Image: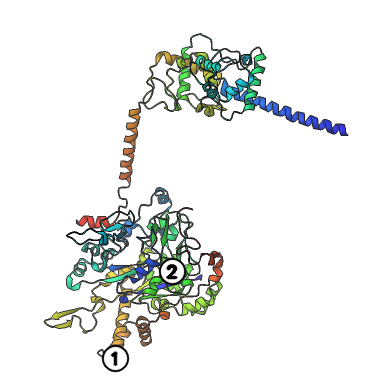
Amino acid sequence: MKTACRFGVVLGLAVLILGARVTVAQEAVETFRQSCISCHTIGGGRLVGPDLKNVEERQDREWLASFILDPLGVINSGDPYAVKLREEAGGALMTTIPGMSRSQAEALLDLIAAESLLETSEFAGLDLGDEPFTALDIERGEEIFMGRRKLANGGPACLSCHTVGGLPELSGGTLGPDLSRVFERLQGRKNLASWLLAPATETMRPVFAGRAMTQDEIVPLVAFFEDAAQQRSEDGGTSRLLFLLLGLGGAAFGFLLADGIWRGRFRGVRQELVGNRR
Amino acid sequence: MDVRSQVSMVFHLDKCIGCHTCSIACKNVWTDRQGTEYMWWNNVETKPGTGFPTAWEDQEKYQGGWELKKGELKLKSTGPAKVMANIFHNPHQPSMDDYYEPWTYDYETLFDAPEGDDQPVARPVSRVTGEYMEVEAGPNWDDDLGGSEIYAANDPNLDALTEEQRQQLSAVERLVMFYFPRICNHCLNPSCVASCPSGALYKRGEDGIVLIDQKRCRAWRSCIAACPYKKTYYNWQTGKSEKCILCYPRLETGQAPACFHSCVGRIRYLGVLLYDAERIEEVAKLPDDEIVEGQRSMILDPRDPEVVAAAKANGIPDDVIESACKSPVYRFVKEWKIALPPHLEFRTLPMLFYVPPMSPVMAGKDGDSVYHLTDNNLFHDIDQSRVPISYLAKLLGAGNEGLVRYALRKQKAVRLYRRALTVGDVDDASAARALREADCTVEEAEAIYRLTTLCTFDDRFVIPPMHREEAIQMIEEPHGHRQSVGFGFTAGPKRGL
């Protein structure tokens, strides 16, 4: 009886601990998918950031964890390796992940270590090859960009926040950067495609969290951006002056309209009485 | 029959001397706070004149009161559609200019000014902005037909007159004015209460006083547009609206309201009336020529056993019913029928009644001797009054000249009757004839005379017991707040929720 009881407790604890470990591991996969794969692969070669396969052979765990938690702090401390990393990334700074704790960073490193052992990791990144895209791809990409074709997982159209060269006036958002040259900025297909897998800026991450783009959408978009980088000029969408003038004009029209609609509104009594006689 | 009690008022305009003592008494007690400087819960207007705020009687402009639309009573100022359209701004309110910009004077310069060629003067300083200002209008700017002729000429009640009558009114030898003191009418069908989106206004069940809950008011200012008498005011300091509270804290302690108490001419009477609340809607829908009689018929005889039984069934205490039997208002309004409600055509059923004023006797001068212009050498014929009957009827009778003529004839008859008794230059027979023609008995004439001229404090103010012991839960800690708070129940009014 006593033994059975002890066995039960041990089993229960084991289930709890294992269960907790499983959830921590799942969380790490989720985090990696959402926040890391836009710049890193595991065994897929360099993107903006380095390939993370066997990263622990290059730096120790302690250093890696603190770099994940506070990249800018490590760079500013003058660490030569960190400075070198930044130079290699063309000056791009690794973003921090909100709410990241030391234990979560450790879990991420565990995940990277485990994935490094595999022949091909699921985080090896997209390889779109070098073949030229078809005109159909480019056209579909434009449709997705313009929002004429909906994203399968419900993400918003690019146009809501971004613009690209050659759009008509007053179309294209100004919240995000102009994407005419994004293909060049991100240095090619592979980087751009990986970025689109899980956009990792602070603005885009929450917007696309849980609404990731599918590969069927990413390929045409990359095709569109590649084409745009070659064909389109950079002055996209709306000129700021025109926007301002239209806004002012619209406001003035609104006031005049309200004034017209409520022409007979109450404007005081005494002033009218006395004013009429002056 | 749904019998309820209402503390009601009579103002005897024939006795009002336009001294504004009532206004000052009220101002000192209630509206001397910041944000209330411009409010006059009690004000006295000169008629003909536009009053305060300017031309308040013109509901084409201010959209106050009720109107009959397809047999239904509708608020003029708001409605389901209008309330949405005007949700951020209620357009039909008097502007500060229509009230007036309150001011004080910079008295210090009288003492501090450096020596110079001119006398120092105290410049007016705005009590809203604190800057020097040019005074352009005040709450009684047209007092005694002063200010300018513009105000008197634009009195909305003059619409009832013919062009000839209008011309005569401004002719010097016929020039006439009278005074019209106003407080909240504590109406039976108050449009301010009906319009409030927050439900902050209510009519007290026990005495019918209309109040604004300072905690629930959300500054929609619907009441300001809806009240046709413009007797709710917005306090810019607290962000709430305020109005005459009929000095209920004084009434509850058996004292007359401050304006009543201080009245120099003793024109004010106060007493409780019993009325049939079931008939409010029916009466408010009556056409203009029946509505005054209709309102009068709502007021019930407190001596009628049937009324007393219904009143008791409704929880009206015995001593309130007893007080209603002594009410001077009941006598003026119901028994003698010489007090009339102001502008009943707004359909709010005001419970403040006015005894219409007699016009000055007209006399002329021939050389050194003064002579009367009228036939019987003592009083002019009522229809020849300097203030045209049609004017008074527009103001007090919802356009019914007959009712005003009746009230004035009776007053004239009482004067002739007393003249016969005390001076003797009117013979008894013609006095008796005048009484008969005015539908007045000798006893009634005597009673009117006594209550008009010899009235004591207790005759004028028959204040019903307020039975605050039954409402004590509303004032949880009266002693805790004694002498610390004026306006407001247990806490002073302030901005916020």
Q: Quick one: which residue is furthest to the left in this view?
A: B367
Q: Quadrant of residue B62?
A: bottom left
Relative placement, left or right, of B154 versus B309 is left
The circle drawn on residue B428 is 1
Q: In screen coordinates, is B299 left or right of B370? A: right
Picture coordinates of residue A145, whole percent (x, y): 46, 22
* Residue A142 rendering spot, x and y as whole percentages: 45, 19
Q: Nearer the viewer, residue A200 or A249?
A: A200
**Residue A104 or residue B22, whichever sits in front:** A104
The chain carrying label 1 is: B
Crowd band around label 2 with a 10 angstrom C-alpha radius: few (<14), some (14–19), many (20+): some
Residue placed at 41% from the left, 79% from the top? B457
Residue drawn 24% across and 57% down? A273
Residue type at tag 2: Cys
Q: How far apart are the two marked residues, 1 and 2, measured between alpha carbons?
A: 45 Å
Residue A63, compared with residue B205, is above or below; it is: above
> Quick check: A260 above or below B36?
above
Q: Label 1: few (<14), some or many (≥20) within 10 Å? A: some
> What colour scheme was applied to this rendering of the protein?
rainbow
Q: Which of pointers 1 and 2 indicates the residue nearer the eye? A: 2
Circle 2 chain: B
Q: Is residue B319 left or right of residue B426?
A: right
In the rendered view, would you say B114 is above or below A18?
below
